[in-house]
Amino acid sequence: MTALKLVGASAHKLWGGRFAGESAPELDALNRSIGVDFRLWPFDVKLSKAWAIALWSAGVVTVEESLALEHGLDRVADRLRAGAQPNASDEDVHTLIDRLLHEEVGDVASKLHTGRSRNDQVATATRLWSMDAVGVLDTAVRELQMVMLAHAESLSAASVLMPAYTHMQRAQPVSAAHWMLSHFWPLDRDRARLASAGRAAAVLPLGSGAVAGCAFPISRVLLQGSLGFAQLSLNSIDAVSDRDFVAELLFTLSMLAIHLSRVAEDLIIYGTSEFGFIQFGDSFTTGSSMMPQKRNPDALELARGSGGRLLGDLTALLATLKGLPSGYNKDLQDDKRALFDAVDTMMLVLPGVAGALSEITFRADKMKAALSSSMMATDLADYLVGKGTTFRDAHAAVGSLIRQSEETGVELHAMPYKTFKTAHASFGPDVFDALSAVASVERRETEGGTGPLAMKAQMKSAWASLA
Ligand code: ARG
């Protein structure tokens, strides 16, 4: 969150008229959202400029007044860009911009709020912010996918094989590129969800007023076009309180965080001395203050941990929305806390994971050494099926071989041929070919399988999804 220095304290309020007394400082402190929503200022300026034009075309302000408002808003933006800070009495970003606009253009600034409310204003600004964030997030996810794809390319070029696990037990040999891409596709789905969250945000609420619509003949269609929205909201009561787009973005980010936690977990485990499949680099790991030998994958652990925070943001928003009466309610002010926290967190995590992954080196030797011949048990059973045995009988025969292997400590490939023959009469001397990990991988050529041709097609699809 941007650290704000609140300076000065001359009260500028958008709503003081009907109150005889001052509001309590405790209310001001609770009500004030400038510390969270300050970052909406570029979007609030943008929509306010569009509103100034809409007021002119509706005949509410003259062309001179409209231009004065527009130019004044440009100067407000210049000041904010140059580092102008809110003062202690600015309730929220809309109040701040209104105050600065008064400083820039004087009384004509008081005309800008005609026909609009902070209710349609904040909904519009938050949507614009979200549409922008979706683009930034998409780029960051795409960069991580590129790192994965680059690793997949070199692993595949070197024909590196590794064990695939189910229940965290060695299951079957796969190409290491196949494993790498197993983390690529979830991110592809996340990008599709991001695009969908962007479409959910691209519905313009401006012109809904506080709740009932706008009494002046402003063109919402022109506002929609000039602000880059894809659609108009169709019900003003719904429009001022619809935060579905925030929920959709937060769900998308939660799902993304869950995917990143799984990538991180695989890498952390594979980087242990016990596995040794990968080695971490220097730039995204840390040392220990006590144990000189340590290299800790902090970036990946922080990524894994951030899933909890993102789920918290989603849950907080959904809990806020549940049971809200229709129309705008101040509860909604908290939507931005969750939204900004989730996006900020993700924009720290994504480059961290991409960086940590990019500097990892793969130990093909260690992966190969982990390919014990019992992992080809399914291939042995398939071999018997090829000789006319039912899969159930084949499974039982190979099972008995595995039991003997466990009891004697002799691996399948080191057992004498006659042991195979005793387990099932259909085993021929070529049985040892079925125990090759390379052959096992090469046999799995159905679409989405780990066979070399299927892998080639998968890589092609992966490149296409990034194009
Ligand atoms: N700061 C408020 C928010 O974020 C702006 C809307 C205020 N609307 C109101 N009726 N007080 O939701």
Image (cartoon, grey):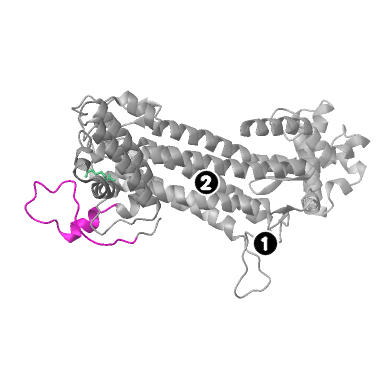
State the residue position of label 1. Answer: 282
Q: Quadrant of residue 285?
A: bottom right
Residue 199 visible (yes or no): yes
Q: Is mark 1 within 8 Å of ligand 1?
A: no
Report the side of 181 relative to 326 (left or right). right
Q: What residue do we see at 76% from left, 37% from top?
A: 378
Where residue 420 appears, x then y in whole percent? Answer: 87, 40
Q: Quadrant of the N terminus?
A: bottom left
- Main SS type for the magenta part? loop
Q: For the residue labelled by badge 2, is the local secondary structure a helix, a strand or a loop? A: helix
Label 2 crowd bin: few (<14), some (14–19), many (20+), radius 10 Å: many
Give the farthest residue toward the front.
64
* Residue that protrudes farthest toward the bottom in the picture: 290
Q: Which amino acid type is shown beneath numbered disc 2? A: Ile
Residue pictured at 56% horizontal, 57% vertical? 301
C-beta proximity under 8 Å, tags 1 and 2: no
Residue 29 in magenta stretch? yes
Q: Which residues are magenta?
A: 5-33
State the separation of the CA atoms marked 1 and 2: 25 Å
In the rendered image, the vertical position of residue 190 relative to residue 231, given as above or below: below
Q: Is residue 392 visible?
A: no
First reached walking from the N terminus: tag 1 or tag 2: 2
Q: Which residue is mark 2?
A: 258
Numbered circles on residues, count: 2
Nearer to me, 375 or 1? 1
Q: Nearer the viewer, mark 1 or mark 2?
A: 1
**Residue 33 image point, x, y percent:** 29, 52
In the displayed structure, 214 sits above or below 302; it is: above
In percent of width and height, residue 443 lies at 79, 32
Tell me the quadrant of ligand 1.
top left
